[in-house]
Image (tube, rainbow, N blue to C red):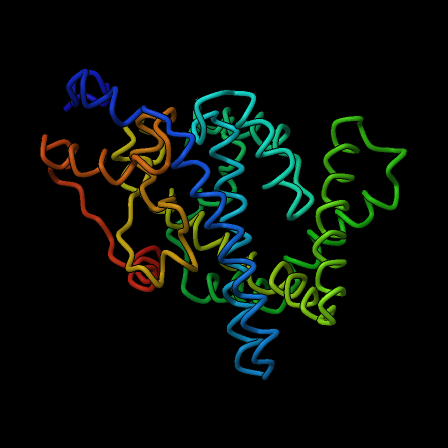
Amino acid sequence: MTANINDILTAAQIAQVRRKSNLRGLWCVACQWGITITIFAVTALFPNPATIAVGTLLLGGRQLGFFVLTHECGHRSLFKSSGLNRFVETWLLSPADFSNGKSYMREHLEHHRSVGQASDPDLNNYQDYPITRERLRRKLKRDLRGQTGWRTLSFKLRAIANLDQQTPEDKAALLRGVVINLAMLITMAAFGVTWLYLMWIAAMIFVYPTIARIRQIAEHADVPQLTSPDPRKNTRTLYANPLVRLLICPHGVNYHIEHHLLASAPIYRLATMHRWLKQNDYYEGVTFSRGYISLLKRVTI
């Protein structure tokens, strides 16, 4: 079957799945920040080892959520106008982890053009799969022990310490990150719970790298034919329950075949798009993994 979206869905269906909604986009951002704030609030109200541990774990999922919505705004698909996408990404999303959304999207668009090819900037994340279970364990241990996260955070801290050596674009992105993170810290201090910010840093070092790796594996590792131009063969969509979506695949990012098939479709339309594609027999012969544990077993030997 063709991979051309115009041969799979009707013109009306394509128009529907590409339709952007400022209200839906605002809801995504409000939920993202609202859940983040709620995690901090619950931990502050009931401070004990269990709430701190669970809260830190959930914050790692929220950090992925900021990344996912940054990605959406980069595609100009979360809101109707490019200006609103750019503003929200610039000030409300990417600064959470000191990211440069513009720089990320320049690489990411090349990923869409050349997924699985030598020029794919993400190729190193999944080209070796399937790998041995022992090798995957070593990768996940490095993430869980903080080696991966500390290396990434140290790089950002060194960049902040040497702002004068950064490009104007990177300098501006880092300064916005400082502003937003200082605002978080000052707000916590005002409520007498400054220590909560350590949970954010701990999630950044110990949790987020693990979740990010699992997401990368889920999207493209050990797919039927990585070098194929057909998204059904070079990309994976995965089913997940609400709890797993909260932690590992927020905002519907698990619908990845759909995203590669039509990158202009807002993330809040991908579940509908998936359903219509199934109804039109687009996925005949495609197997969808259910949950990430079974997937990790599947991509190892």
Which is nearer the eye, 77 or 141? 77
The quadrant in which the C terminus is found is bottom left
Residue at 35% from the left image edge and 35% from the top image edge: 226
Horizontal and vertical percent for residue 206? 60, 65
Q: How many marks?
A: 0
Residue at 72% from the left image edge and 59% from the top image edge: 187
Locate residue 21: give its quadrant. top left
Which is nearer the eye, 122 or 13? 13
Locate residue 279: give its quadrant. top left
Which is nearer the eye, 278 or 283? 278
The quadrant in which the N terminus is found is top left
Furthest-front residue in this view: 191
Horizontal and vertical percent for residue 199? 64, 67
Establish if 49 lies above or below 298: below
Which is nearer the eye, 32 or 112? 32
- In-image side of 161 versus 263 (left or right): right
Horizontal and vertical percent for residue 135? 48, 62
Horizontal and vertical percent for residue 229? 32, 25
Residue at 51% from the left image edge and 31% from the top image edge: 73
Locate residue 267: give its quadrant. top left
